[in-house]
Amino acid sequence: MHSELVLQVKSLLWKLAVRLVVLCCALAIAGAQTKPAQSPYIGSTVCYGCHAGLSKQFFKNPHYISIATKKETPENKGCEGCHGPGRAHAESLGKKSLIVAFSELSKKQTLENCLRCHSSNLSKANIERSIHTSSDVVCNDCHSIHKSPEPKFLLAKQQNELCYGCHGSVRAQFSMPFKHRVNEGVMTCSDCHNSHGTFAADWRMGAKPRLVDQRLGNEEPCLRCHTEKRGPFVFEHASIRVEGCESCHSPHGSPNAKLLRRPVVFTMCLECHNGAGTFGRNNNGVPAQSSSHNMLDPRYQKCTTCHVRIHGSNSDPRFLR
Amino acid sequence: MTVRLLIGAFIVLALQAQQPVAPTREAVGAADGDARGLYNVVQSFELGYRFSEIGGNRDEYRSNANYGNGIRLLGSNLIVHSKNGRARYFDELVLTTQGLGNDPYESALLRVRKNRLYEYDMTWRQNAYYNPGLVVANGTHFRDTTYRWQDHDLTLFPTRQYRVLLGYGRNTEAGPGLSSQQLFDGRGGVVPFFTNIKREFNTYRLGGEFEFHKVRLHVMRRWEFFKEDTPYFLNTPTRSDNPLDPTTITLFSKSEPYHGQTPGWLVSLFAERRRFAVNGRFTYAGGERNFILNETALGTDRFGGNQNRQIIVSGTARRPVTTGDASLSLFATAKLTVVNNSSFANTRIDGNNFFQQFDNATQSGSVVNFQFLGIRLFTNSTDARYQFSRRFSAYAGYHYSDRLIRSIEDSAAPPDPLDGVSARQANHLHAGVAGFNWNPWQPLRLHVEAEVGRNDNPFTIVSERNYHAISARAQYRRKNLQVSAQYRQNYNNNSITLSSYSSRARNYTGNISWAARSWLSFDASYARLHLDTLGGIAFFAGAPRPQLVSDRQSLYISNIHSGTLGSRFQLAKKADLFVGYNITRDAGDGRAGATTTGTAVDQLLYSVQTFPLNYQSPLARVSYRYSEKLRFNVGYQYYGYKEDFGLFSINNNYRANTGFVSALWSF
């Protein structure tokens, strides 16, 4: 009798204990359901735990400003500003699929990710229609966010080497006897080009010239340094204003003196000045050479010896002074 | 990670094969920098002596390379970062210099930034420009000048919704030169005279950026001032360049103070939403120049008569330029982007001058000139890009341009009225582009692109009319190996009633960079640039009276082979050896000489149809690491320039041995 009572009490206590555990679990679950959801953002400090190599020098990175100023919202701050929320990635102990890894993104996604902050900038206004974007050359093809060896703009390499990587013919042009001093370090590609895309030029036509940056008055970048050729002149050499300096010059480099497209001047001049066309003074076309110029006489073979103001003159319609 | 970084660094170093041998590219000091209170500092300085020895045509060497002798601060860099990004005066300071102390190419870059408060950028550059002008003007257009540029940009509150932009730029060119002039008539001799070139260009910028409701407005006001006060003079009796022409100048002087300004506006708007982005831009620049020219020449003309000629010209030239752009980008789906751009540009150049000539104190002529050149250009383009998958995308576009060029040119002797005839030319360009990008395998990327265009009335004979361009590029990229190859061709045919012009350009390039070991890397590139052009020309030639020659063509053939080789070895972590070689060889069309049989005209044209030459530059540099913070460097670079046959019998060949010794240290 006594043993039966003991068994019943034990059974009752066991049932009570089981019900208590179930109740506690239910409460815990209920409590969890009513508690606010955790933010998917975890903060850069957590990232530093595993990515110590990247974080050690991150204070030198321009993006560090998002952490330093303490004004940014979590989605625009530190590592998660570019790589997205990191909680799930951290809690999974580094599962790659739970973080924005740029190596896994398409070119379009990479571009969109960077443009989230970098789009409202005049120099990048045309990036969507840039030939670089069309050719799938996007931000991280030229910029190295974490390992840039360059002191400015997070470039992946020295600027000219970066451009030569794809533009091999340009490397060859800058190695010619006559060239702008890019390899020598006094000029850079971005002095004349905007790799992020440019507005339509007002010299030449169509989409050309590509990625050539313009000055304020939409002029060719050449005139930034060669200011004396800018004018305005009373007598403009119309082909320069209409078709640009490249009508006669190879701007990167050339085997010919003064970056000319031909080794001697007269062939270049005569290729246009043959009397053809119907434009110009009284619709007479491009002026042909004067009958007083005997091309077999060496002094007439160097046109600019007399036509010294060939880029434009204020005094003489034939550019003689 | 360290190994990867080292390999990456070696690839960067190896790729610099065609660079001048100095400054040294190796680094000293702790790569991560040293802690200095609240800041981290990375710095190094390279001081050395550069030497050169030139044989042959020194003018050509100075025109191509121009390195001389002397002590130089070959390079330096100082990079300071605050460790917490909230330092008191600045959070970042970057200062790099190159070639200071009389190298022909000197530069200094400075950036100072305080987070959220200001950002200041300064660029200073100097280029010693030397050009003997031999082929162009037989040496009479010699120039030995110095270009200097400086740009200062200050941005206040760079990360806020409003920014203030301030800027100043200054370009100058100064130095001696020669110029030339034909005297005293259109058949007279050409006389060289001295110039002392003085040009100055200053620009001031003031603007701001404001953001409201996610629309950013950028406004910039700009004032540009140009002045040239170059005098031209000759005060020793000088004969003309033609030995058969007795023209002699005893005194020549010309001054043309030329001052002008270009005030301008730039206004732009940007807005981006999830499905679209728009931007617009408006610019106006109103250039104006006022000038007066006073030229005096004394001497004897080609008939032996005494001449005392004075020419005075005064006037004004204006060029207002207005442009407008509007772009709409539609992100129709996550994979499709369509961009439409419309641009408008209107350039109006007008100018007048009053030309007076006095011969022997008697007014022999006065002319009033008026010129107008107007260029109105409208361009519209639509480009669509579709990302089919993560590995494949394609794009296509249609570009249309409509251009109208108007001209009025007239001159009259006062008091006759000007009644110039207006000329106009309109042309339209239709062009289509298409291409694709394929990434079939992670390290391999392929890009193919084509463009076809039709221009109904190109402005110049060498302009594009019926043209096409095709390019293809393949790139293989692993961590320690990069291989790429590219082909591009541009063909143009511009045939009109009176003339014809065709050009064909084909470029083949290849590049390989291989970091075989952490202590060994190689780089090589090759490019072949082919160009041939053929154009109808007309000119006068012959004796005793020149006759019109219109049945000849101007042919030009260039076949350039360009190669670079570079290799870097590290020996026992103590010494770095870099050897490189760069060669440019224009093989021309394969001919052995510039002379041929036939008429004098045929011989003249034949002699300038191609210009074969050889330009090479091997180099070697050894950098010895004495301690973590000190390196000793020595380098040698050879420049060799050789023309297969000189144009106009001018031989410009030279050989130059150059080099340097230096110490690179960090303290």
Image (cartoon, coloured by chain):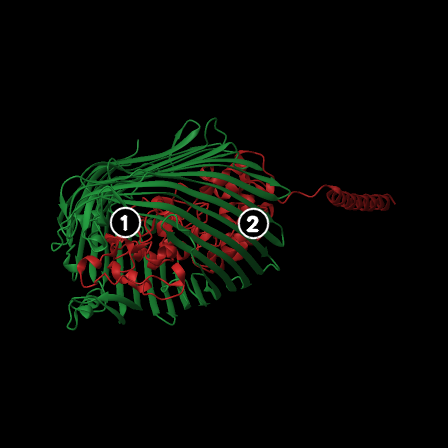
Chain colours: A red, B green
- In the displayed image of the protein, which residue is found farthest to the right? A1
Tell me the chain of label 1: B
> What residue sits 49% from the left and 56% below the top?
B376
Note whether residue B609 is visible.
no
Q: Do the residues labelled 2 and 1 touch (CB within 8 Å)?
A: no
> Is residue B419 in view from this perspective?
yes
Provide residue A138's location: percent of width, then percent of height: 48, 54
Horizontal and vertical percent position of residue A264: 24, 59
Q: Which chain carries label 2?
A: B
Tags 2 and 1 on a common chain: yes
For mark 1, give the secondary structure.
loop
Quadrant where the C terminus of chain B sits is top left
Residue at x 21%, y 58% (from the top left corner) = A300
Q: Mark 2 points at which residue?
A: B280
User: Residue B19's mark?
Assistant: 1
**B639 and B634: which is toward the camera:** B639
Q: Where is residue B601 in the image (x, y as percent from the top left)?
A: 19, 68
Q: Which amino acid does label 1 sit on?
A: Gln
Going by the numbered disc 2, the residue's amino acid type is Gly
